[in-house]
Amino acid sequence: MMQALHEALRDAARLCQLVQDRYLSASAKTAGAHTEPVTIADYGSQAIICRALQQRYPDDAVIAEESGRQFRQVVSSEKRAQALQLLAAVLGEAVSEAQLLTWLDFGAGRRSRRTWVIDPIDGTKGFLARRHYAIACGLLVDGEIADGIVAAPGYNDGEGALFYTQAGETWRALLAGGAGRRVSVSARRGGDEFVVAQSYERAHASKSRMGRTRELAGLGGARIVELDSMEKYALVACGDADLYMRLPRAGSGYAHKVWDHAAGVALVQAAGGMATGLDGEALDFSRGETLPNAGMIISNGQHHARVVAAAGRALRE
């Protein structure tokens, strides 16, 4: 089922890379224009994915980060024209603004057993800084995680990879195309070989609390890999990392968006790993755009209960 969307995410990644190559460096020189390239890429990426969904799954619902109304109100006429030109270049056909608006809003507000959750660019600051970012599409069936695809252009020093679920397993293929290879979480249990992935940006989670959690769980010697985006989930799923935590900063009331996590959770679970809330509870994707969970712990399963207990103690201290 998900194979029909592989090319859509690859096309979305191509569009994002075109935006970086054509507009990013020039825009970065202009005060106040730093977010414009990612704005164009966000809308273009989502349009490509929703176009594929509309063609193949016309009755399904969609929860996505962007909307046609936002595109009309926020994006300048010049940038709207650039978005249409980029879409035409990637799709190989002329695209009107009416088509773009229809794609952006496809499935929005619809009730269906099947709901696609889209993050057209996860890791905005990583995209702008040419670090890591991801393009993600997850599938919920009756509010439960069913499948996921994550395109990671920065994976393996920029080689790029497409991570996806298929028949209850997780696979990885080159972003440029070709056959996939089944992957699974690692069996590493600790020591210097244990790898922890965490957010590059300090504002996204409490690095001090996560460090304290690692110490309390006996994982203080683990190697830390910092990067942006949902690619961290993919690293756990394919065995490149063993643990990823998202612990809130003190006083934070941030509500996690479902599109930042759905596809990644699908990858980890299908690869044999564990994805829970901070108390070990299930991550609840059934409540619309936000998760009720205050944070999440993603692991290869080897020390999950120990990390949950350690996180609880770190949060109480």
Image (tube, rainbow, N blue to C red):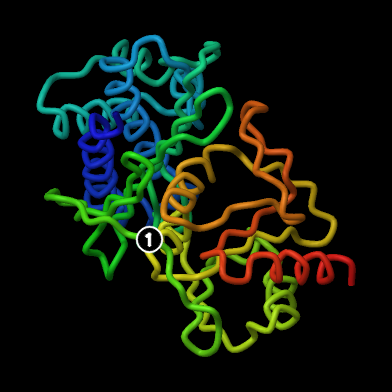
Question: Which quarter of the rendered picture does the C terminus lie within?
Answer: bottom right
Point 37% across, 31% down: residue: 46
Left or right of 21? Residue 287 is: right
Point 81% across, 64% down: residue: 312
Placement of 189 over or under 24, stated as above or below: below
Q: What amino acid is at disc 1?
A: Ser
Asked if one can make out residue 91 in the rendered structure from this viewpoint, the answer is yes
Left or right of 25? Residue 267 is: right
Q: Nearer the viewer, residue 223 or 200?
A: 223
Q: Secondary structure at mark 1?
A: loop
Q: Position of residue 236 (x, y in %)?
A: 46, 63
Point 45% across, 70% down: residue: 241
Q: Nearer the viewer, residue 134 or 239?
A: 239
Placement of 221 over or under 49, stated as above or below: below
Q: Position of residue 298 (x, y in %)?
A: 57, 59
Placement of 246 over or under 65, stated as above or below: below
